[in-house]
Image (cartoon, grey):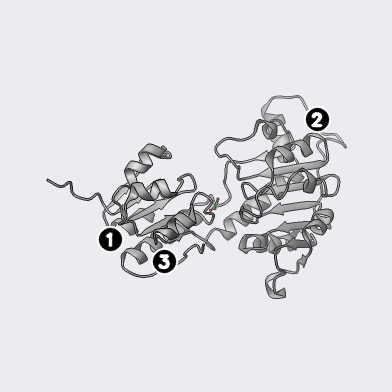
């Protein structure tokens, strides 16, 4: 006797409240109820026979995954704007569309960027750790002095949606903004920021925010040589894993070349380099950029809408282009 096919949809992590119902109203779904990542063997077994899978950045989707799924797989909907976990060529070879969640996480991620920028520039992590450690302290004219932002030049590396939202918020802090993208944006999208070649941007940005996606061209773009182009005492805020070389960043903090840094996404999550953990001037947070209920509902909702569109025979709403 043939075993019946499994439910058509696999969801690899519990989405935000309210998201699942939109799927389960229409299709039978297998949800990984345990709030942890499936290991590789569990993932490959779980995806077998599905028509759709809702993945996270921690699920590697490659030829092995697609073979384990089988030829009936119609869509991989990634619960992220990024897609470095997915081998797009392998999916394209098999005609499996991949979708991401652009747009809906812009505001939350820009807000987190500013939280980190302020925390790094004003040494909030250090101050918090000091109090919690019970270290004696008193107010003093030179105690834990930070970098004042008004009038300080801000550079945005990667003026996509998130970079533009970060630049827009810089007005509230009276910071002049420069940016680098492969191409200058039309003025109505540039938020008053000035395009500069990469090396000029680095040389003139006392605060640098990195929001460009990590691709073949941008991996470790900010290596030791380019970090050394920043003005002495600069602050670096890294919102994309893989673009800033984490060891080089730690070394630039250690030497005092940088004043401070903050990192939200790490290259080999969940591991965080010990060289960075050793830096008092580094604000390190566990991939919280889009972590609000509203945004996670919108991201999950968009991933679900992509699945429903494809299973209903239509086109994906937000396909990732190869
Ligand atoms: C965030 O990490 C994303 O790519 O959505």
Categorize mark 1 by other alpha carbons within 10 Å: few (<14), some (14-19), many (20+): few
Q: x and y percent of residue 123 in the render?
A: 75, 40
Categorize mark 3 by other alpha carbons within 10 Å: few (<14), some (14-19), many (20+): many
Q: x and y percent of residue 320 in the render?
A: 50, 62
Instruction: Indicate the secondary structure of the residue bearing disc 1.
Output: loop
Instruction: Indicate the secondary structure of the residue bearing disc 2.
Output: loop
Furthest residue to the front? 93
Q: Is residue 14 visible?
A: no
Q: Is residue 149 visible?
A: yes
Q: Quadrant of residue 162?
A: bottom right
Pointer 3 residue? 316
Please tell me which of labels 3 and 2 falls first in the chain.
Answer: 2
Please tell me which of labels 2 and 1 falls first in the chain.
Answer: 1
Label 3 to label 2: alpha-carbon separation? 59 Å
- Per the rendering, the mark at residue 138 is 2
- Per the rendering, the mark at residue 87 is none
Q: Quadrant of the N terminus?
A: top left
Pointer 1 residue? 26
Identify which residue is drawn at 48% across, 56% down.
88
Say if 268 sits above or below 77 in the image: above
Q: x and y percent of residue 125 in the render?
A: 70, 38
Question: Which of 95/284 is in front?
Answer: 95
Identify which residue is drawn at 32% across, 69% down.
313
Instruction: Indicate the secondary structure of the residue bearing disc 3.
Output: loop
């Amino acid at each position: 006797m043939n075993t019946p096919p499994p439910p058509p949809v696999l969801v690899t992590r519990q989405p935000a409240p309210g998201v699942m119902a939109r799927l389960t109203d229409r299709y039978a779904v297998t949800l990984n109820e345990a709030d942890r990542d499936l290991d590789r063997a569990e993932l490959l077994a779980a995806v077998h026979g599905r028509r759709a899978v809702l993945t996270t950045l921690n699920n590697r989707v490659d030829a092995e995954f697609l073979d384990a799924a089988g030829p009936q797989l119609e869509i991989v909907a990634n619960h992220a704007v990024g897609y470095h976990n997915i081998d797009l060529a392998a999916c394209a070879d098999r005609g499996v569309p991949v979708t991401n969640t652009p747009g809906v996480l812009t505001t939350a991620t820009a807000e987190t960027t500013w939280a980190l920028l302020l925390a790094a520039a004003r040494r909030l992590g250090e101050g918090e750790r000091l109090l919690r450690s019970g270290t004696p302290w008193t107010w003093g004219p030179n105690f834990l002095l930070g970098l004042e932002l008004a009038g300080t030049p801000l550079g945005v590396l990667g003026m996509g949606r998130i970079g533009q939202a970060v630049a827009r918020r810089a007005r509230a802090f009276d910071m002049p903004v420069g940016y680098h993208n492969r191409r200058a944006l039309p003025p109505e999208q540039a938020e008053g920021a000035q395009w500069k070649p990469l090396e000029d941007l680095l040389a003139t940005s006392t605060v640098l925010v990195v929001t460009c996606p990590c691709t073949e061209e941008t991996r470790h773009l900010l290596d030791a040589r380019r970090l050394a182009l920043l003005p002495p005492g600069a602050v670096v805020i890294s919102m994309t894993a893989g673009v800033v070389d984490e060891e080089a960043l730690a070394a630039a903090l250690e030497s005092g070349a940088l004043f401070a840094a903050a990192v939200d996404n790490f290259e080999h999550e969940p591991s965080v380099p010990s060289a960075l953990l050793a830096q008092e001037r580094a604000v390190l947070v566990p991939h919280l950029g889009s972590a609000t209920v509203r945004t996670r509902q919108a991201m999950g909702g968009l991933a679900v809408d992509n699945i429903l569109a494809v299973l209903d025979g239509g086109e994906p709403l937000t396909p990732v282009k190869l």
